[in-house]
Image (cartoon, rainbow, N blue to C red):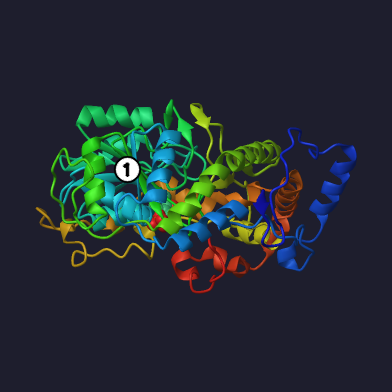
Amino acid sequence: MFVAKASGGAPPPLTGNISWLPNNSDRNTILGTAMQKLAILGGKPVRTKPFSPWPQYTQADVDRIVRVVESRHWGGFPVPSKHAGEFAARFAELHGAKYGLCLANGTIALLAAIQALGLKFGDEIIVPAYTWDGTAIAVLQAGCIPVFADVDPDTYCLDPKAVRAAITPRTRAIMPVHIAMRFADMEALQAIARAHDLLIIEDCAHAHGGRFQGKGAGAAGGAGCFSFQESKLMTAGEGGLVLTNRLDCYEALQSIINCGRPSLTDKFERKVLGANYRMTELQAALLLGQLDALPELCQRRTHHASVLSKALGTLPHLRPLPAQPGLERETLYHYIFQYRPTGTAPSRDLFVAALDAEGIPCDGRFYEPVYRSDLFYVTPENCPQLMLGRDEPIHYSACRCPISERAAYEESVWLPQFLLIGDEADMHDITQAIQKVVSNLGELAKADPKLAGLKACSRALRAKMERVKNY
Ligand SMILES: Cc1ncc(COP(=O)(O)O)c(C=O)c1O
């Protein structure tokens, strides 16, 4: 049983049928709502009730945390500690990987994986331009160089063609990100990696429990890295984990996160300059409960996403992301659809602001192409590897990834995952609100573009003004 801590409460049981898809009388109500004045222009919002609270927890989680507190073993030393070891083993099994190791957070997971796989100062790693800044920043923190490649317009994940074009004699690895609700084409990327002798490090910060092309998330390449930050599909507030099938990598990871101490098995006897990146037992105890809850929540999100895609597919100016062949277990960190209006139309940012004003939390600038992000503060002084063996340092201002830019500034609409863990009445409200905004695009186009407010502002700058948000 989930514990309801805020209005919105615990998710109700899933029902198989979509009872609210419009019949004749519903159609009239929807049409009626659609014709009403937009909330952003002073009308009544479609929804005032909050969605399901996030994170979710159960009484069993509270009891487990109390037991950890009472055990007086709260930290992460020795590695792995009881709960962290148990959680990592279960998480690895779920994804079909041999080894799993918990650590401090998702950024550190990427950094530690890069180091554990033996990448060196100045090595180039190809990353998608459209991702959270942390993907590329971890590469830089590890002394390597992120090389941005564009994404596929139907998945927003790394485009294998763009990866091929980005390969240089210094390329050593590819870092695909399985973003929001889709996977990068791992078969194609693995073929490229084999042909050019490159490593693959998967950024699975959005892909807990997912399975694609016969492999669990994070189990297809050299290493797979997860985040358990508070907005993620499983969370301990903060936290991270690396999956790998390679014992040398697993051993090196244990040393890297544990101040350089030898691993439990130490077959490879590798010496590293480590630090303390351990996960605490309190975090791991929470994650055990999150893992128990994952299958039902995943099923709920998948079901509701298909309901939304069906409904949005009937609306003009919008495009749900096409289904992805090979996706065996879907994982939905955000539900994304595309805003593709024709003719004179309000900006995507204003569309998103109008939808938010109808009571549907959403975002457009969830990510920007990293090379254009205010958080990507990279200079030859703070990242000297950009100068290594070059007359001129790398200038990220010269990057251009048109699909990523279109996604970030014109097209993508992101609905956070907790909107999908409630009931079908929630899907009804979301669809009604979207339909209402779509039906009023003409009015919205005449409105002051400044009404887009924070939705037209980068997330880096918004942080000061959005203290209550955890996604
Ligand atoms: C795609 C991606 N990569 C990496 C990270 C970094 O994870 P963390 O915030 O746990 O450091 C995140 C999380 O925000 C993410 O979304």
What is the count of numbered marks?
A: 1
What residue is shown at x 57% (from left), y 69% (from top)? 468
Q: Is residue 369 visible?
A: no
Q: Judge left or right: residue 431 versus residue 296.
A: right
Instruction: Residue 122 in the image: state x and y as whole percent.
Output: 16, 51
Q: Judge left or right: residue 465 versus residue 311.
A: left
What residue is shown at x 52% (from left), y 41% (from top)? 181
Q: Is residue 321 visible?
A: yes
**Of 273 and 444, the residue lying toward us:** 273
What residue is shown at x 85% (from left), y 36% (from top)? 23
Instruction: Residue 439 in the image: state x and y as whole percent.
Output: 74, 50
**Of 50 and 140, the residue lying toward us:** 50
The amino acid at mark 1 is Met
Instruction: Residue 290 in the image: state x and y as whole percent.
Output: 53, 48
Q: Quadrant of ligand 1?
A: bottom left
Q: Is residue 134 above or below residue 253?
A: below
What residue is shown at x 64% (from left), y 47% (from top)? 420
Secondary structure, mark 1, is loop
Q: Which residue is mark 1?
A: 175
Q: Is residue 265 above or below residue 51?
A: above
For label 1, count other residues whose C-alpha is less than 10 Å away and answer few (under 14), some (14-19) or many (20+). Answer: many
Instruction: Residue 352 in the image: state x and y as whole percent.
Output: 61, 57
Residue lying at the far bottom in this picture: please name it.
Answer: 464
Q: Assess mark 1: CB under 8 A from ligand 1?
A: no
Residue 198: name its quadrant: top left
Residue lying at the far front in this picture: please name it.
Answer: 71
Q: Is residue 94 above or below residue 136?
A: above
